[in-house]
Amino acid sequence: MNALRRSAVAILATFALSACGAQPGTDTTAAPAPGQSATPTAAARDQLARRGDLPASNRATRPTPTRTTASPRPRTTTASNDASRLRTLPSTTTQVIVVKANGYGTSNGTLQAFGKRNGTWTPAFGSMTAKLGTKGFKDSKVEGDLTTPTGVYSLGGTMYGIAANPGVRYSYHKLVADDWWNENPATAGYNSFFHGADPGGASEALWETDPQYRYFAVINYNIPVRKADPPRGSGIFLHVMVPGRSTAGCVALAESDLVKVLRWLDPAAKPRIVMAPSSELDRY
């Protein structure tokens, strides 16, 4: 009889637990101890809010993070010009003259002047029309072949002219009678300025060559002279253009353009002149 009573009590207890909604293994909230409030603590409310068991009005309000899309950075482009293509200029050079043509076989070219500031080459003037040798550019010039030598060259320390000094920053020599450019390969002074009797060969009477030598700068091609057979050539100048005529190998500009360039050139800037077809400038 006692065993039957204990079984009946156990069955009734199970029904009672099922009616309260408690399931085996489920945490239940303990009843408050005597004297304690039945209101949940702040921590408990937080926990309940996270579980979604409190009404929305009682939940802690948290700002919703906003996702911002970074604005794309503007692309910066560096202006490109012919001076920026050059690779072999001395690091101390801050002035460069670029003489170019559309190919090797033309005597029509252009001259551009650039100055370097804060590591960037910028034009000093607009592009100028230039005349080259009758047979255009050549990579391996020889004496008398009427070509303009390609390459990178410094400029002579003295500028010359039949006219008075136009205001250049270099030393200037006003030409007088018996001033020659020695273009005789058989002499010790080949490819240099000479005052005196005619050195022979194809030497030029500088004081008589007008208007070409009204003003000119020496391009240091084959200076100092390198012995070669046949000789590599001489007397390559930047001089005044005769309209409609090519040169024997020099670079020629309109007189006003030439004076502008000669005044701009500064020996302290270690200037260089680069001469080549446009497609070949990257070689230099």
Image: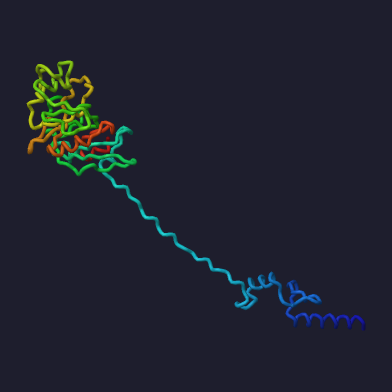
Looking at the image, which is closer to me, 105 or 118? 118
Instruction: Please indicate whether residue 107 sits to the left or right of residue 156 in the image.
Output: left
Residue drawn at (59%, 72%), measured in percent from left and top?
Answer: 61
Q: Quadrant of residue 70?
A: bottom left
- Percent x, y of residue 90: 31, 32
> Which quadrant of the structure image shows residue 262?
top left
Q: Position of residue 189 (x, y in %)?
A: 17, 18
Give residue 206's quadrant in the image: top left
User: How does the figure colour the protein chain or chains?
Assistant: rainbow
Quarter the N terminus occupies: bottom right
Which residue is more in the foreground, 56 or 240? 240
Q: Residue at x 88, y 80 (%)?
A: 6
Task: Decide which of 125, 47 is in the foreground and name it.
Answer: 125
Q: Quadrant of the C terminus?
A: top left
Q: Looking at the image, which is closer to me, 112 or 94? A: 94
How many labels sit on residues? Answer: 0
Residue 69 at least partly seen: yes
Q: Position of residue 100 (x, y in %)?
A: 19, 38
Q: Is residue 206 above or below residue 98?
A: above
| Horizontal side of residue 54 vs 232, given as left or right | right
